[in-house]
Amino acid sequence: MSLLAVEGLRGGYVAADEIVRGASLSVEEGEIVSLIGPNGAGKSTLLKLVAGLLRPSGGRVVLQDRQIAGLPATAIGRLGLSFVPQERNVFAAMTVRENLEMGAYLEPAQARTRIEALFARFPMLADKRRALARTLSGGQRQILAMAMALMTSPRLLLLDEPSAGLSPKAAEELFATIVALNRDGVAILMVEQNALEALTISVRAYVLVVGQVAREGPAAALMADPSVRDLFLGG
Amino acid sequence: MRDRSIRLTRRTALAAGAASLAMPAVVRAQGEPIRLATLTPLTGGGGSYGPVMAKAAATVVEEVNKAGGVLGRRVQLTSEDDQTNPEAGVRAARKLIDVDKVSAIMGTWASSVTTAVAPLCWESKTMLCTVSGADSITLLPHQGYLIRTQPNSTLQITRLGEYVLSLGAKRVFQMIPQTPFTQSSIKLMEAALKKGGGEQGSLIYDDKKPTYRTEVDQALRFNPDLIFAAGYTPDTVVLLKDIYRAGFKGKIIGMAYSINQKLIDQIGQAEVVEGVYTFAPSPAEGATAYERVKKITGMDNPDPYTCQVYDHANLVLMAIAAAKDASGTAIRDSVRKVSQGGGKTVDNAVDGIKAITAGEKVDYVGASGPCDFDDKGDIIDCKFRYEQIKSGKLALLKIA
Amino acid sequence: MTGWANYLVFIVATGGFYALLALSLNLIWGGAGMVNLGLAGFFALGAYASALLTVNAGAPILAGIAGALVVGAIGGYVVTMSTTRLRGDYLAIVTLGFAETIRLVANNEIWLTRGSDGISGIPGPLKAELGGWFNAAYALGTLAIVALVWFALRRIDLSPYGRALRAVREDEQVAQVAGKRILRFKIEAFAISAAIAALAGALYGHFNSYVAPDIFQPLITIYIFLAVAAGGVGRVSGAVAGAYLVIFFLESTRFAAAAIPGLAPVQHAAIREMLIGLALIVVLRWRPQGILPERIPPAPRPQSQEAT
Amino acid sequence: MKAISDTVPRPHVPQRSEPDALLAIRDVRRAFYGLDVLRGVDLDVRAGSITGLIGPNGAGKTTLFNVVSGLVPPDAGSIRFAGRELAGASPEAISNAGLVRTFQVARGFPRLSVFQHLMLYGREQPGESLAAALFGSAESRRREAELAERAWQIARLLNLERVIDHPAQALSGGQKKLLEIGRALMAEPQLVLLDEPTAGVNPTLKAEIAHHLRALPARGITVLLIEHDMKFIGALCDPVIVMAEGRVLAQGGFEAVRADARVREAYMGVRA
Amino acid sequence: MDAILQAAVNGLVAGAILALPAIGFTAMFAVLRFPNFAVAAFATLGAYGGWMANAWLGWPVVAALLAAFVLAGAAGAVTQRVALDALRPAGPLTVAIAAIAANVILENVLRFAFGNDLLGFDLPLARDVRFGSLRIGPQQIENLILAVAVMAALFAFLAFTRIGKAMRATADNPDLARLKGIEPRRVELLAVFVGAGLCGAGGMLLGLDTSIDPLTGFRIVLSVFAAAVVGGLGSIPGAVAGALLIGLAEELATLAIAPTYKSAIGFVAILLTLSLRPRGLLGERAY
């Protein structure tokens, strides 16, 4: 049984205008799975549909045996799925520590121990615990956003273009962090523009084109496939 | 203090309700009634005076009706609210003149309302009786359709200036909000003081501010030995508190319409207002009419406006009786026949109408004074009442 | 004329002033998506301008009214200048303050405005000649002016100018990209709107022959918002209908007040004002389009259409 | 299907003498909150061309459009359009100079009708002065009739005739896209910037849009468009400009650009 | 010189009281993104609430202040729920207009219940204390302390409590807040409760120093707006700074211009701010 199984998912921002048109994919326990594809293919929309930020107009989303399609985002969050948005993903006017507390807003009892654990894991956050989030660099901000998502101890993390806007060095560090997180047992489904880098750290990958899964397979195989490369340039 | 204000409201509420309910039935029984109206501020800045005023007039009408009415007709009194606002006042007056077809409107309080309503009245030949004091009002081309029972500013302030000098004050500071009589008040006081070798400083303040600390500072810098607080009750409450806090040791004088029992209760601390002088056109203290007003309103010290509107109602009703005609013009032409010029002294319309019907000449002496008018409609001389607050109560010093 | 007829004439005239104010508000609220919470201030501005010109300077009444239009437009221009680049909430706050400031000036600049005494003896046109018919004639004249303004605003509404104004209301940025100088449109519209409010004030003064600071209470602004919301935001005819609806409501509650026994006059007045506020919320909530909803004018069919 | 040039009379667009760069952008920079979004963009758009602008998300394409159309002032750099410097000019001035743009998510005036939308974009409207609105003018009536004629033709051409009196908020997604194009046509610009004209559009409609666009240069309208559909780009655009990380990476014919190793890397996300 | 110092002291005290409703107004704006013009009525309601607790029930000042806060806050929350929430899709200006209507209703509910008479607290008045040539009233000092205490409590609430942080989070980034499980409607309601409550507390402090009638709140409302705009709409520290500034400006101005124009100072401050620094002293959306 998969950790996450998506079947024939459909939906978009407006009911009349479907961007995801019957996509199916799955994520197993402990995997890193990448979702790649050309611009406008509907990758981010798919993540938002899964995370409950958008309401699917069709299809099934099963998280550990539970049908979650149509549940509100917070309910899905409680079931062990955490979503990290691409933009505006921290509370800019709050301190790092307060951001983390907000990450576990629904589980305040565990907040203190988890924050300590995250501080141990990301010393940078510990150093900056009293800094306002808006003073962090782009890479630090992404780490904070992920740490916030981890505050609920999720089984599955959904990352929406985590490396967007980062310098190459910061992006590299970020991917290293993602791998490290995964080693601790968190499964990851991420959308990445930085497809080659994403494939490098992924077990499997899906290629999304016009709202549907066009190719899927082991990451290494997809990376080697010239037709995948062509897809990005409309071949 | 709180109990007092609530009781007051409730009582006026009952009166107003009774009046509006009772009236139509009576009217139907009697045919064409004589229509009169009060236009007083039931809400807005003058909202604390209007309801009692309206009630005093209503009681006079009630008594007259009980005694058989005037000219064998019932009197119907309509009471409207001018909201202390000329725009609303004009709308209400229109309704009274056009729909209710009243022949007299009584009790307009704020000078601005009176100024706005007056042209409607003289154009429609409706009598207007007012308690507003601004000099300018009787200077309007009202063709006689206006009388006022309130002495005008010139008379008032001149007298007040003389009194202030008699208290031994040489440096007087006047604190006054922006009102129709502000300029004349400052000018007249200045003149009155100069005659006696006194000096005046003055400050016009914004009557909508929660505190006047800085204004009081400014006043104290003048080093006055007397402060003349010439505002209305709401701002004077604040002003007196701030004067007290500032530690002012000199004398304070104010107009009785603002420094009244309500203000004393408001401030709630005798010490703050101890020794403050008040000055007012005197109701005819001790006059029988004044005692009647006391009874009607249940107040120990009915304010001058209530007394005046009581007089308005009596005068108008007797004028109708004397003219044997209920039109506004008839009232205009005969009001001075019942108010002055000798004859049997009466203190209420019931007795007056009886006497008039019997062919006697009457001279009304009202609750606010003798009620004699000059050609402009101004009251001819008037007594003034000087009081001082002693341990939280207004104590009469003299009436002169 | 006497009695009910005269009263009705008075209501018709007052309704006309309200209608002009409603037309003024509708032009910017419905037309350009701006609000003016200081309508009473512009109303006062016009009333004073015309009163001062005719009483103090002895100008003819028409010149006074023209002066009111100019002063109103300048006032509107000044108020919008500081806020046109900002969001609408700021304009709301500024206009609120503007009305209060106008009242302060009217109250305190006694050399000019005679303070809270107000200005009395404002001449009415042909008052002597018309005698008892003055009110009726004036009410008719007011109606004619309302009709004229209604006609002019409808022309604007249906013209390319009105079209551009609506574009500004819907999306300023896209309107800009479409080549519209939104600043000009917003300032012009507000200035015209302010001038119309001032016109209402001038007419008011010449009718009642008296203006004073206390006349221009902020509550009038609420009346007009209710009028426009009830009539239909964005519909010129709706503003006029709404204004008469409100004046009818205001006057009829005067008669209805007596029907509730056992209340003090203060309480009657309080209930009336409560009803006004309540009505405004109810309209905004359940009938936001008003009784006469905004309409899209159909495209003119070209003659050549049949050929294709 | 008729192309627009067949049915609509040619506008009186003054012919430009310079044959080459209608739009010349040099070293345009823009940062938001310390993040460099445009890091020195240089590009030319040849008059009479349909130029494609492609690049991965976050490359700065839409920001470039915002800067060129005046919605966002550039921090530095020059934008010359038809011989005029436009950097820092107001959006309406730029639009009136003959450079009109559309938006990615169809934006417009939801409560205005299709006809009103089209009319709004008409150039030179004497009727937009107060005097003309109030008193009417022959000039304004003439122009209004002219524009109305044109609006009808464009509506007919774009199959929007049936919905010409409908408010924009009642249109389908595809119709909104067509309306965007119609608006751009009404403006008779020298250069039109199209931000993803086919996003969320079905293949049939896409072909139709391509058809309309292809007819524009003949009418003196140069096109610069952002697009993600490579087929669409390949079929329509020459040259193609590739942006990545706030700079222009490559420029040339579609096939050449596609073959460029740097471009493939940019799209696939290989980093140095 | 003394006059200036004295006016400055008076201005600071007035500003501290003004700060409470200004914070309330700005806080509601930060979370709900529309100007709640009913603040005048909330302040008046607080004044009456405190007065009832003090004069009828004999509660001491601090307890009465709490009553004022709760009554005004509850009125704010009810207004929001019953009248305003449903209008929010129509845009902030529509809600703002409805808030004015709500203000008229609330003001008249008080007028209906209490009439237009002035009411005063049952508290002894004390003479001012002198420091050299400066004087300050014990009541002012008490008000200053109370205002500062309320502000401190508010800042502690926002900085240390979970729900207070959630409020800031919602003002900062509503989408992310929702994603993190923060119920926006609850937070909004809380923001209105606290915001209107602060207006109420400010209204009562005002009433303590002066007297109460249905227009108590209306008298300061322009200054409150001015404080919020000058400080930057949506910024709480900005509202505090703005309030002190407006308080100072109003008092100092009386030395230079006619005191009758005190109320216009706020308007001038708004115009100046919008022309010179439209986002206010501390900018929007700062905590």
Image (cartoon, helix red, strand yellow):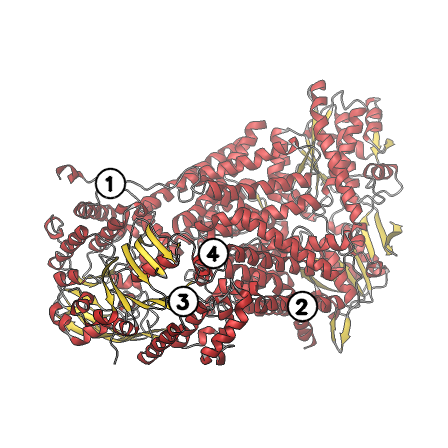
Instruction: Where is residue A95? Give x, y as percent.
Output: 50, 73
Residue E149 - label: 2
Asked if C236 appears above or below D51 in the picture, the reply is above
Amino acid type, residue under disc 4 in the picture:
Gly
Q: Quadrant of the C terminus of chain A?
A: bottom left
Q: Looking at the image, can residue E14 be seen? A: no
Question: At numbered mark 4, what does the secondary structure look like: helix, strand or loop?
Answer: helix
Instruction: Classify mark 3: residues with Cα within 10 Å, few (<14), some (14-19) or many (20+).
Output: some
Q: Mark 2: which amino acid?
A: Ala
Label 3 – label 2 distance at C-alpha: 35 Å
Residue C300 circle label = 1
Which kind of residue does numbered mark 3 sit on? Arg
Q: Of circles 4 and 3, which is in front?
A: 3
The mark lying in front, picked from 2 and 4, is: 2
Q: Alpha carbon of mark 1 to alpha carbon of mark 2: how far? A: 67 Å
Q: Secondary structure at mark 3?
A: loop
Q: Position of residue A169 (x, y in %)?
A: 33, 81
Cα separation, mark 1 vs mark 3, equals: 47 Å
Determine whether label 1 and label 3 are within 8 Å by CB: no
Q: Nearer the viewer, residue E45 or B158?
A: E45
Vertical comparison of B222 with B137: above or below: below
Give the Cα distance between marks 2 and 4.
Answer: 43 Å
Residue placed under numbered mark 4 in the picture: C75
Q: Is residue A16 shown left or right of residue C86?
A: left
For the residue marked with disc 1, what is the amino acid? Pro
**Residues marked 1 and 2 touching at CB (< 8 Å):** no
Camera-nearest label, 1 or 2: 2
Left or right of E184 on screen, residue B122: right
